[in-house]
Image (cartoon, grey):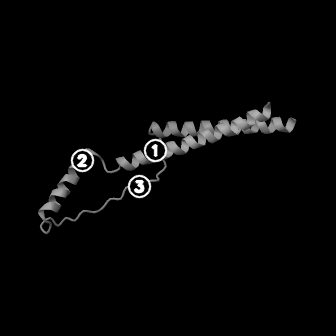
Amino acid sequence: MISNKIIGYALLIIGLVIIFCVIYQSYNIFMDKTSAPLIFKTQIIPQSQNVINQDLQKQLNDAINQQFGKMIPVDTFPKILNLFAWSLFAGILVVAGGAISGIGVKLLK
C-alpha cells in the first residue's frame, strides 16, 4: 500500500518532469535561444566558374537558381523539416509523460 503510493508519486513526478522539460526546450527552440536538433542538413554544391564553356540553357538555369536563392535562402527548407521533426518528437514525449503520470495517478487511488 505504501510502496504503491511511493511508486505512484514517483511516476507522477517523472511524467511531469518529462512534460515540463520538453515544453522548456521547445520554448527555447522557438524563441531562437537554441537550435532544433539537426536531422536534415543542406548540401552546398559548388558551382563551376567556367562560364565560357556552358551552353545557353545551363546559363539560364543557373541565373534562375541564383534568383531563387536570393528570394528563399538555401537552408529554409531543412530548418522547417528540423522544426517539424522536433515538434513530432516533442509531441510523442508529452504523450508519454502524460501516460506515465496517468499510471502514477492510478496507483495513488
Work out which quarter of the rendered image holds the N terminus and state it.
top right
**Could you tell me how far apart the alpha carbons at marks 2 and 3 are, in whole angstroms?**
19 Å
Helix, strand or loop at mark 2: helix
Residue 35 in sight from this viewpoint = no
* Residue that label 3 marks: 41
State whether residue 75 is above or below residue 30.
below
State whether residue 2 is above or below residue 76.
above
Relative side of 108 to 54, left or right: right
Helix, strand or loop at mark 3: loop
Please tell me how many numbered marks the rendered image carries: 3
Labels 1 and 3: the sequence-earlier one: 3
State whether residue 5 is above or below residue 63.
above
Q: Are marks 1 and 2 in contact (CB under 8 Å)?
A: no
For the residue pair 33 and 75, the one nearer the viewer reads as 75
Circle 3 residues within 10 Å: few <14, some 14–19, many ≥20: few
> Residue 103 appears at what percent x and percent y?
73, 38
Which-is-in-front pick, marks 1 and 2? 1
Which-is-in-front pick, marks 1 and 3? 1
* Residue that label 2 marks: 70
**Residue at point 47%, 53% (across, down):** 39
For the residue pair 95 and 75, the one nearer the viewer reads as 95
* Residue that label 1 marks: 84
**Residue at point 54%, 45% (across, down):** 89
**Residue at point 60%, 42% (across, down):** 93
Relative side of 5 to 88, left or right: right
**Could you tell me how far apart the alpha carbons at marks 1 and 3 are, in whole angstroms?**
14 Å
Q: What's under tag 2, amino acid-wise?
A: Lys
Residue 20 in sight from this viewpoint = yes
Q: Label for residue 94?
A: none
Helix, strand or loop at mark 1: helix
Q: Residue furthest right?
A: 1
